[in-house]
């Protein structure tokens, strides 16, 4: 296990970071798989609950993983590209929803209570909007790095799991641009209605993504993160890496969260190995993006809210998975005849 490499001093460091970050504990994973085979159920009959328990064993480094402290981080940011008319909501909704998170009135407050997670909301750069990527790079590499380091620093090393989410009017356009910038394709391939954009707006949104990709799409995955991304997206990428450095498994949220970490995958796919994807969002780009990232979502229940809500619902299933894994009797203990 290596030293905590944060704060990073340049985005370039991401290229070799996977070699400096801890990997999975394969002995713990094997032990968990062996335990699953001995529990009083036909092998495989608990479906993804079994794989989930083994994932947590590998990334917590113990055969019997536990969740005492679940940390949910919601990063908030604003985006210059809203000037292109790509969201039905005005930019001031970002700060208003941050206030709603703080007073406990948002969906994520209720879901964190239901799932037993502690919520923290972090406004990146005081919600100062990025620049409009259809005109110029959204961020300088230095601004992007600052947001990434903020995200990495926010992770509690005592947490047993991290849920990652965001709030930012316009950021489904950022997500589409990041997906196109990292994996190719046109704006139309990656955009969707987000918070409820109409058909005319969708054409503008796809056009904005195409314009941004034409301007900045020649850049590599890390260049794309700064030029087409957003501050809360960079912070989410940083939190995912900070969690890896601190030995904390991660549950990713929807389209925006997964697009935020796509540049990490572009730099080195191993950087996402400790992450589960909580759900498949109804935003149409998400399922396509998960295919590119090689990730299977835990659930698909038509959610498309963001703010870590899908990750919080998935945490309920992770808790169910670990209760079974740790609490069930083996065939030998229960005196049940094996196949
Ligand atoms: O991540 C998703 O799957 C997702 C899908 C649709 C909407 N959102 C949320 O909606 C906001 C962005 O939507 P928009 O239409 O303003 O781009 C932002 O605050 C996200 O949290 C998020
Ligand atoms: C009301 C509202 C709540 C949200 N939560 C995450 N993104 C959001 C966007 C809007 C518009």
Image: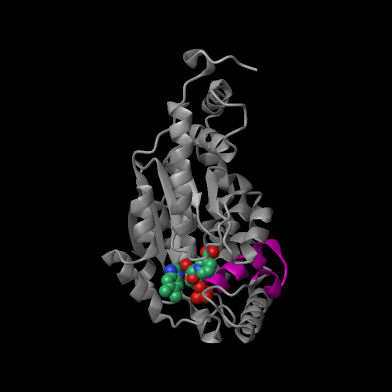
Q: Main secondary structure of the magenta part?
A: helix
Give the vertical position of 305 relative to 130 (above or below): above
Quadrant assignment for the C terminus = top right
The residue shown at (41%, 63%) is: 75
Q: Is residue 185 above or below residue 160?
A: below
Residue 143's spot in the image, x, y percent? 45, 67
Q: Nearer the viewer, residue 334 or 4?
A: 334
Q: How many marks?
A: 0
Question: Is 75 left, or right, of 173 in this rendering?
Answer: left
Q: Which residues are magenta?
A: 171-190
Q: Quadrant of residue 180?
A: bottom right
Kindly give the residue lying farthest to the left in the view shown. 103
- Of residues 269 and 141, the one drawn nearer to the viewer in this rendering: 269
Asked if the magenta segment contains residue 178, the reply would be yes
- The reply, left or right, for residue 230 in relation to residue 269 is left
Q: Position of residue 296 (x, y in %)?
A: 62, 48
Residue visible at 56% across and 51% down in the picture: 299
Residue 239 image point, x, y percent: 44, 53
Q: Is residue 263 visible?
A: yes
Residue at the far right in the pictured view: 185
Residue drawn at (54%, 23%) of the image? 40
Position above or below: 149 against 79: above
The quarter of the displayed image where residue 47 is located: top right
**Is residue 138 among the parts visible in the rendering?**
no
């Amino acid at each position: 296990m290596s030293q905590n490499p944060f704060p990073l001093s340049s985005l370039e460091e991401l290229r070799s970071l996977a070699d400096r970050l801890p990997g999975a504990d394969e002995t713990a994973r094997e032990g968990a798989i062996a335990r699953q085979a001995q529990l009083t159920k036909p092998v495989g009959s608990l479906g993804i609950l079994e794989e989930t328990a083994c994932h947590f064993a590998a990334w917590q480094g113990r055969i019997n993983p536990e969740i005492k402290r679940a940390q949910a981080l919601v990063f908030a940011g604003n985006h210059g590209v809203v000037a292109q008319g790509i969201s039905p909501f005005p930019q001031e909704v970002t700060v208003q929803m941050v206030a709603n998170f703080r007073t406990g009135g948002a969906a994520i407050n209720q879901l964190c209570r239901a799932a037993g997670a502690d919520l923290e909301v972090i406004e990146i750069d005081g919600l100062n909007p990025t620049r409009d990527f259809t005109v110029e790079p959204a961020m300088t590499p230095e601004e992007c790095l600052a947001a990434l380091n903020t995200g990495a620093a926010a992770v509690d090393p005592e947490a047993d799991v991290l849920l990652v989410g965001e709030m930012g009017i316009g950021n489904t356009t950022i997500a589409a641009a990041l997906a196109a910038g990292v994996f190719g394709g046109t704006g139309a391939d990656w955009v969707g209605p987000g918070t409820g954009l109409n058909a005319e707006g969708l054409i503008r949104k796809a056009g904005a993504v195409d314009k941004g990709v034409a301007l900045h799409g020649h850049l590599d995955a890390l260049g794309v993160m700064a030029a087409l991304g957003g501050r809360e997206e960079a912070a989410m990428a940083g939190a995912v890496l900070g969690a890896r450095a601190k030995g904390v498994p991660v549950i990713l949220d929807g389209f925006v969260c997964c697009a935020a970490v796509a540049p990490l995958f572009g730099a080195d796919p191993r950087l996402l190995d400790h992450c589960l994807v909580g759900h498949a969002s109804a935003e149409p780009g998400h399922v396509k993006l998960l295919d590119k990232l090689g990730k299977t979502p835990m659930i698909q229940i038509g959610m498309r809210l963001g703010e870590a809500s899908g990750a919080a619902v998935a945490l309920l299933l992770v808790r169910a998975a670990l209760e079974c894994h740790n609490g069930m009797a083996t065939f030998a203990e229960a005196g049940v005849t094996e196949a």
